[in-house]
Image (cartoon, grey):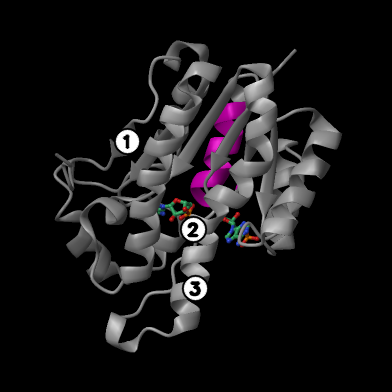
Amino acid sequence: MSRVALVTGGTRGIGAAIAVGLKNCGYKVAANYAGNDEAAAKFKAQTGIPVFKWNVGDAAACAAGIKDVEGALGPIDILVNNAGVTKDAMLHKMSTEQWDDVIRIDLGSMFYMTRPLIDGMRERNFGRIINISSINGQKGQMGQANYSAAKAGIIGFTKALAQETAKKGITVNVICPGYIDTEMVQAVPEKVLQGIIATIPVGRLGKADEIAKMTCFLAGDDAAFITGATMTVNGAQYIAG
Ligand SMILES: NC(=O)c1ccc[n+]([C@@H]2O[C@H](COP(=O)([O-])OP(=O)(O)OC[C@H]3O[C@@H](n4cnc5c(N)ncnc54)[C@H](OP(=O)(O)O)[C@@H]3O)[C@@H](O)[C@H]2O)c1
């Protein structure tokens, strides 16, 4: 029986590449999304991967959504907490709403998504939880106090849960992508983008598929001894100690 994987924010960008990568590795995959029905329908038509709409920043919606996915595909063995948003502003101009939204969607979702799944993984003595953080959670980024705090929080969450679940065959790891060539990054003005690329020693943006490849490796049996790890995939733009 194929293992079942759920990718949040799995219909666009990095999440879509991860969902397709996991499918190509032989898993039964479900992709969650927030509200862009058109992109989700296109993704489903192109890949055959079923899509499920809910807001990962809403605990009750996560519990209900997980129930729907498990009803359709079976118990979830692999959870990729990928969905995330940015609401950038310098702190002296940041609203409470910008702070709360990013903390709830990017960090709160770690708990809202993982809590309903952890009992089943513990009972079955198997689980893979792969959380997508960011280079900016490692180094901090001007204008992103909310995002940097949430993404740094994901690293702490991962390290704690890895210790709690290690004896139950569940691994918990975090991937910190650098700048990846997604729609979000393509929207950056060309001059600014060239400035960013100049700070990446490898000399280019990362590819979503490179994050997918790392995710597939962490999901597999060969990665059973890797847990609590922070995998940096950023072309040496920032080398964490
Ligand atoms: N792109 C980069 O360079 C980069 C670098 C470092 C880290 N990251 C992280 O990697 C992850 C993916 O980034 P991306 O650039 O691929 O994002 P993206 O292109 O903006 O795609 C976002 C995906 O997440 C979904 N989503 C957004 N908010 C959601 C919510 N509240 N509930 C459920 N789904 C939601 C979107 O659904 P809809 O289509 O319905 O909106 C979409 O499927 C994020 O956590 C991001 O912080 C990205």
Q: How many residues crowd mark 2 within 10 Å: few (<14), some (14–19), many (20+)?
A: many
Q: Mark 2 points at which residue?
A: 106
Relative vertical location of residue 149 with respect to residue 171 in this rendering, above or below: below
Relative horizontal placement of residue 222, taking residue 79 as reference (left or right): left
Left or right of 144 on screen, residue 171? right
Helix or strand or loop: what does disc 3 sit on? helix
Q: Which amino acid does label 3 sit on?
A: Asp
* Mark 2 Cβ and ligand 1 under 8 Å apart: yes
Characterize the local packing of mark 3: few (<14), some (14-19) or many (20 or more) Cα atoms within 10 angstroms.
some
**In this orientation, which residue lies closer to the viewer: 205 or 75?**
75
Lower sequence index among marks 2 and 1:
2
Magenta portion: prevailing SS class: helix
Alpha carbon distance from label 3 to label 2:
10 Å
2 and 1 marks in contact (CB < 8 Å): no
Q: Residue 218 at what x, y percent from top left? A: 45, 24
Which one is closest to the eye, mark 3 or mark 2? 3
